[in-house]
Amino acid sequence: MNSRIITNGPLDINKQAVEASFSKAAEHYDQFAQLQRDIGLQLFKQLSADKPANILDLGCGTGYFSEKLADFYPHSSLTCFDLSSAMLEQVKQKNLVQVTCQQGDIDKQPFPKNFFDLIFSNLVVQWSADLGCCLQQLKESLTTGGKLHISTLLDGSLHELTQAWKSVDSHPHTNSFLSLAVIEELLAPLAFQSLKITTETRTLEYDNVIEVMRALKGIGANHVHGHQRLKLQGRQLINQLEQGYSPFVNDNGLLNLTYQVCYIEAVK
Ligand SMILES: C[S@@+](CC[C@H](N)C(=O)[O-])C[C@H]1O[C@@H](n2cnc3c(N)ncnc32)[C@H](O)[C@@H]1O
């Protein structure tokens, strides 16, 4: 499948290009982010009603869940962290109290050790160049007994689009995602006090390939590592892609797009 091999070490990700894609999408992100909402709400249900002093929303995006965290934990200090300056601008416009916005990279975390009592991260760590290292840094920044709640994507996500593009050319047009087995292997040496991993499959439906591509672009998830952007040009190309997608047209005549979701719940 598409899984990366852990022994290959860090991926070469152009963070500037990732930042640019997400920043371009920041203003209209919320209109396209229904799946991100649904997965984030599922992740939010894991949270307990304790009183964390310091919370991190890692890869906060426009701050939809930062706002929910601030409401749910009104006495906590919240750090909203994201690579994209434009995403953080959206958070700032929410005028949340006890919130600090910080721009940075999940692969070079600037946080103090033993600081956060709760880390929440919805659909972000699939953008890490080195997930093992990213998780290690997150664990270090947690207090003893601190809680980590992460959702991410697994291999098999977007497989219809990946297959459809293969009928057009041999370049990758989608990013690859780690397998569950690899994520489990990366988490094992971190020896969390408790660790629970759950998975689910979510399938979205679209009218046509243009809508599929528009959905990815709408949330800024259209940067493909090391390769050209997801871009459609010309009727002929669209027809070819539609053709490649034809095995994934469902009984309602709509195009399926699958997401394999992984939820990680850990206590340091
Ligand atoms: C799919 S959005 C999720 C946003 C938010 N958590 C939500 O649930 O709406 C992914 C977010 O991760 C951020 N991101 C991507 N790569 C990152 C990195 N290396 N470091 C920090 N943030 C990153 C993007 O800018 C974007 O805001």
Image (spheres, grey):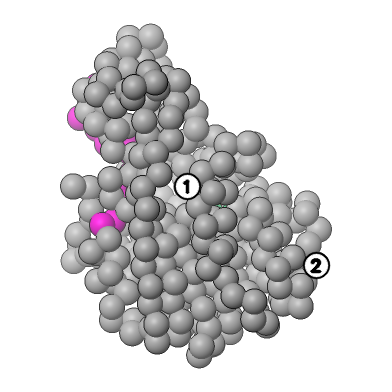
- Whole-percent x, y for residue 148 in the image: 49, 74
**In the image, 231: left or right of 178?**
right
Query: Magenta stretch: dominant SS?
Result: loop
Which quadrant holds the C terminus? bottom left
Give the Cα separation between the discs numbered 1 and 2. 29 Å
User: Where is 66 relative to 47, above or below?
Assistant: above
Q: Is residue 19 visible?
A: no
Q: Which span of residues is magenta-colored? A: 168-179
Residue 6, quarter of the rendered image: bottom left
Q: Nearer the viewer, residue 176 or 223?
A: 176
> Which three-letter amino acid code belongs to the residue tagged 2?
Val
- Which of the labelled discs sits on residue 139, or is there none? none
Ligand 1 within 8 Å, label 1 CB: yes
Residue beneath label 1, please?
18
- Which amino acid type corresponds to the residue marked 1 in the rendered image? Val
Q: Nearer the viewer, residue 26 or 257?
A: 257
- Disc number for residue 97: 2
Q: Is residue 122 magenta?
A: no
Q: Viewer-nearest of labels 1 and 2?
A: 2
Q: Residues within 10 Å of mark 2 (few under 14, many from 20)?
A: some
Q: Position of residue 143 (x, y in %)?
A: 54, 87
